[in-house]
Image (tube, rainbow, N blue to C red):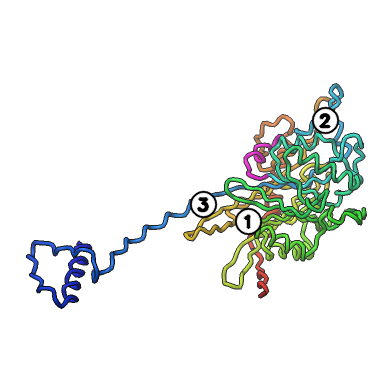
Amino acid sequence: MRLAALLAAASLFFAAGCESAAPAKPAPEQEQAPVAESGAGDAPALEPEPAEPPPPPPPVEATLVAIGDVMMHKPMLPGAYDKETDTYDFSGFFAPLREVFEEADWAVANLETPIAGDDRGFPGYPMFNAPVALADALVGAGFDVVSTANNHSLDQGFKGLAATLRTLRERGVVPVGTAETQEEADALAIVGKNGVAGAFLSYTYGTNGIPIPKDKPFAVNLIDDARIAADIQRARSAGADFVSVSLHFGNEYQREPNDEQRRLARLAIESGADLVIGHHPHVVQPYERYRVDHPDGTSREGIIMYSLGNFVSNQFGDYKEYGAVLKVTFRKTYQADGAAVTTVAEVDAIPTWVHKYVDGGKTRYRVLSLDEVTLESGDPLLTPRMRSTLVAKSEEMNSHLDKLAAAAGTGQAPVAEKE
């Protein structure tokens, strides 16, 4: 009906505009006015109504899990050694939590020991080196990104650092924080999973006094405010949907973050990072939700895990045998104009415990989720008394992890300078 009315109006307009045309006969009420033929003086052709734009794609989600320090003290070696085959097997460290790592889209670890080659031996603290089998165990457990910037990066010198990187890359693991060449140091580690691109950066406060070679200043990423901010922006410009920054910082064995940790971690979020993963204290520190307000009135939230503690080590007492697995789910939402916004959808921190036990005459290590230990647990390696202690520790550690999460801190994003 709408089209007929428009055409009728166009016909009347044409008749009125031509002086020599005969008067138009009134159309019978029940008949439709004739459609004028195309020609000079006709009304312009009607534009078709624009098609409705297709709806944006549905949101997608991807999950990252991260663990704390993976170490290699000398007492950890004999239980993993098979004399008959002359090989090591460290898969038992990760076996109880393997499903958690494998189900994640990214699994990230802090490798706090070089893997420089078995021919160098395994001296333990303070100049670590781990068997190549440790890299195999990490891969077997599902890890695909490893932070290598820490105070033990140069324990086996630059050659050991380079050998570690090659060992990891040969197994498909992405190392971040150290480099064999300037080109490697400049490259961004952006790993896409399930339609979400994550960028991974890593920095350390130092290398235990071992100097970085003067002709290889790129070898280890040192913490520097300006560099961290610039690298975050480079990652954003390269298409990262989220940016994760690992920081090796803080005071050893302190269960609360210090002022410098808070400043650095919050600066990273204000500079555009979405997640900060802290290491070095060897004990768990709480995580924090940190909101950044932008000059345009919008805001975004980042997650700061100040310290995940030890994942596996031979350190015990004063909470050193307790760690955490951080689990962060990112949601990428598409807008009508085609742009996408990625936000933190869920956060969880799972407390863990290093169980050192004797089996088959050997001292072995495994890492358990405290949340999975119950009084009725059928684990034959745990006595009723141990289960009772661990249930209480689970409650304590969960409370400690969450103590900063409820009251989110707030900061301001830097104002972009005009060119």
Check residue 88 in the rendering and tell me which mark sits there, or answer none.
Answer: 2
Q: Earlier in the sequence, mark 2 or mark 3?
A: 3
Res 246 → quadrant: bottom right
The amino acid at mark 2 is: Tyr
Q: Describe the element under mark 2 as helix, strand or loop.
A: strand
Residue 17 colored in magenta in the image: no
Q: Is residue 51 left or right of residue 68?
A: left
In the rendered image, the quadrant that contains the N terminus is bottom left
258 or 355, which lies in front?
258
The label nearer to you, 2 versus 3, is: 3
Q: Position of residue 412 (x, y in %)?
A: 66, 70
Quick one: label 2, few (<14), some, or many (20+) residues within 10 Å? some
The amino acid at mark 3 is: Pro
Q: Could you tell me if the residues under marks 2 and 1 are in contact, i.e. CB atoms within 8 Å?
A: no
Q: Earlier in the sequence, mark 3 or mark 1?
A: 3
Q: Is residue 220 left or right of residue 381?
A: right
Q: Position of residue 208 (x, y in %)?
A: 90, 53
The number of callouts visible is 3
Residue 98 colored in magenta in the image: yes
The amino acid at mark 1 is: Gly
Residue denoted by label 1:
239
The residue positioned 67% from the left and 31% from the top of the image is 378
On the question of residue 403 being in view, the answer is no
Query: Which segment did they paint magenta?
Result: 95-106
Quick one: label 1, few (<14), some, or many (20+) residues within 10 Å? few
Whether 143 is drawn above or below 358: the answer is below
Quick one: label 3, few (<14), some, or many (20+) residues within 10 Å? some
The residue positioned 56% from the left and 49% from the top of the image is 61
Alpha carbon separation for disc pair 2 and 3: 44 Å
54 or 300, which lies in front?
54
Res 139 → quadrant: top right
